[in-house]
Amino acid sequence: MIADLHIHSTFSSDGRSTVEEIMEAAKLRGIRCVAIADHNSFSSYGTASRYEGIIAVPAEEVSSSEGHILAYGINTEIRRGKGIGETIDMIHDAGGIAVAAHPYRWWSGLGEENVVSGFDAIEAFNARSTKGSNNKASRLAKSMKKPVTAGSDAHHIDHIGEAYVELSDDITDWEGVIKAILDGSARTGGRHRKGGDTLKYGFKSITEWMGRGFRRM
C-alpha cells in the first residue's frame, strides 16, 4: 500500500486544493492512505475520513516556536507557537505521535540540534526537500534509531504521491498505519526537489517568511 503522509488542503493558508479534490486525486493514483496535515488546522479530517477505499490519518502540521512538527493520530487541534517539548506533550495528550517534519529545511525545519529524543519518528523523505536534506534526515533517523515517515508535502493535487511510504496491504485503518510507522516497517520512496525548483521555491518561501515578520507558517 502506498501512503502519502504529508499533504496540504485549502485549510492551509498556502494550500490550493480542497479536501475533496485531494481524496479523488489520491484514489485515481492508487494511493490508499493519506494524511492531510494542514498548517495549524485539524479541519480537513472530518471530510477526509468519510471517503471509502482510502485510509485518512488524523493529522496536523504544527508550527512550534522552533519549527514544524507533524502530528498523526490526534483527536483535536494542537495549538501553535509553543516550545518543542510542550508541543510534543500536547500531541501525546491528544493521542497522537510527534514527527519532526523536514528537519533540515532552514526556514521551517527544526534543525538537527532540536530533534530531541521525545519525537516518535522523523520525516526522512519529503518531495519538497532536496536530496541532500532528505539523505541527512534519513541518517539522523538511523543514528537516533527512530522510525521514518515520508510525504509529498503537496500543496496542489498535481504533486500528490511524489514522496510516500510503502506499507503492508493488510492494513485497514489509520491505527494500523501508525503502528506500522512505529514498528519501523514503513519504507520511503519518491522524488527529491530538483535544483531549479529549489531556487524558485526557496525564493517564494523566504519572501513569504519575511512578509510574515519571520514568523513560521
Image: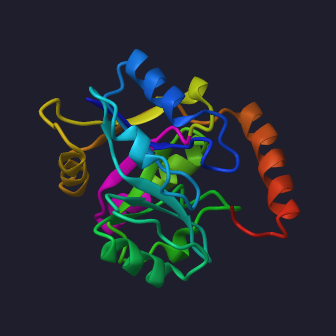
* Placement of the N terminus among the 4 image quadrants: top left
Q: Kindly tell me whether residue 162 is visible in this rendering.
A: no
- Residue 169 drawn above or below residue 176: above
Residue 144 in percent (x, y) is at 34, 68
To which quarter of the image does residue 89 belong? bottom left
Counting from the top left corner in percent of width and height, residue 143 is at: 35, 65
Q: Is residue 96 above or below residue 43?
A: below
The image quarter containing residue 67 is: bottom right
Residue at 54% in and 51% down: 38
What residue is at 57 percent from the left and 27 percent from the top? 157
Q: Is residue 79 magenta?
A: no
- Which residue is depicted at the point 40% across and 36% down? 164
Q: Point out residue 34 in the picture as x, y percentages from the top left corner.
A: 38, 38
Nearer to the camera, 5 or 16: 16
Q: Is residue 99 above or below residue 48?
A: below
Judge by depth and name the residue closer to the eye, 69 or 197. Answer: 69
The boundaries of the magenta stretch are 138-153
Q: Is residue 134 visible?
A: yes
Residue farthest along the left direction in this orientation? 170
